[in-house]
Amino acid sequence: MIDGSQSMLRIELPDKRRRSLGAPLAARELADAPPPYPYGWFAVAFSGELRPGRLMTRTFMNREIVLFRTAAGTARAAEAYCPHLGAHLGHGGTVVGEELRCPFHGFRYAVSGRCSYSPYGAPPPAARLGLLELRELCGVLMVWHGPAGEEPWEIEPPEDQSRWRPLRTKRMRLHSHPQEVTENSVDFGHFSVLHGFRDARIVEPLSVDGPRLRTSYAFTRPFPVIGGIGTEIHIRVDGLGFSVVELSVKAGWSIRQLVLTTPTGVRDVDVFVGTSVRSRARGPIGKATLTPLEMLIERGVLRMVVVELLRDRQIWDHKKYLGKPAIAAGDGPIAAYRTWARQFYPEETPR
Ligand code: FES
Ligand SMILES: [Fe+2]
């Protein structure tokens, strides 16, 4: 009797209906897609978000981590769970001076990860906070994801760090993958078709050196009223998670734009977008006159970058990764890019 009523409750979908429910995701996750969590440095927060004394939780490579900054300004990234009895440090944990305090039993952790205090006397030696490698550059906090025991390589920061204004920022959630987002910078063919850029040409062909990739393009970006702005872009990519694009526009401004992609789950990414202008303001009068203009440019460029990403999103939301694409002559160096990108996966991964 019971068996009979249970079988009555089971809903049998016709074959056709079952296929259509799973089809969009399955199509995007076919076996030739790269693994979801490549090795490298990936953004977890903008520097301005993590003020001294703050603690925050972020999703990183399909798990939760915490970020905190001490009163003196030292930033750290750590596994979310306290090594004592597993409390989530991002839920009730606090920064106390130079230490992180767990809300469950009050253990405290120094920035070295060592447990510096336990209310029961000597802290257990095994109580060590699981720290992750963290770097802060160009206004962003980057966390390392790599094979166990392997020393991370370092991001090469742009040479000229002076006079860049603080980043204007936005964070977006997209269905994509860091390799796909970065491939966008070398996919020459889509610039005109999807983004409407005109007269695109390569200024410096793609060059690679270990985890670094560099290239430069020039094109005219459509712009209301004046029709278009001549732009030269210099692309600096260090792994699949860090990329700085420096633009020079004909009016003489240098603009930096960051589009940093961090996996949070399979085909889910956080994209950290930031723009900054290299300030031309000198002295009090220069600052009073130019700073509002510089802020306006940053805001305008940020909006443009977001609009372009939304155009890409229409494709990324539905496309699938082809391991053997039918590359055409006008595509740009996509094949060379993919060969370079293989280094960010375990060796046995055929990509
Ligand atoms: S779980 Fe953190 S102090 Fe006990
Ligand atoms: Fe694009």
Image: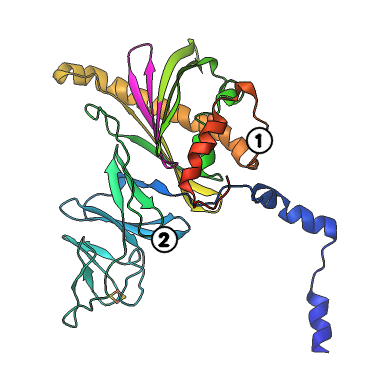
Q: Main secondary structure of the magenta part?
A: strand
Whether residue 230 is visible: yes
The residue located at (83%, 89%) in the rendering is 1
x and y, in percent, of residue 299 in the image: 38, 28
Quadrant for ligand 2 reads top right
| Label 2 environment density (alpha carbons within 10 Å; few <14, some 14–19, many ≥20) | some
The quadrant of the rendering that contains the C terminus is top right
Q: Which residue is mark 2?
A: 64
- The region drawn magenta spans 235-258
x and y, in percent, of residue 273 in the image: 41, 37
Q: Is residue 243 magenta?
A: yes
Among the 4 quarters of the image, the one containing residue 176: top right
User: Helix, strand, or loop for circle 1?
Assistant: loop
User: Is residue 7 found left or right of 38 in the rendered image?
Assistant: right
Q: Amino acid at mark 2?
A: Glu
| Label 1 environment density (alpha carbons within 10 Å; few <14, some 14–19, many ≥20) | few
In this view of the protein, which residue sits in the foreground, 128 or 46? 128
Among the 4 quarters of the image, the one containing residue 92: bottom left
Q: Is residue 288 above or below residue 14?
A: above
The residue located at (21%, 60%) in the rendering is 111
Within 8 Å: ligand 2 and the Cβ of disc 1?
Answer: no
User: Is residue 203 found left or right of 87 in the rendered image?
Assistant: right
Q: Which residue is mark 1?
A: 325
* Mark 1 / mark 2, whichever is N-terminal: 2
Q: Amino acid at mark 1?
A: Pro
Mark drawn on residue 222: none
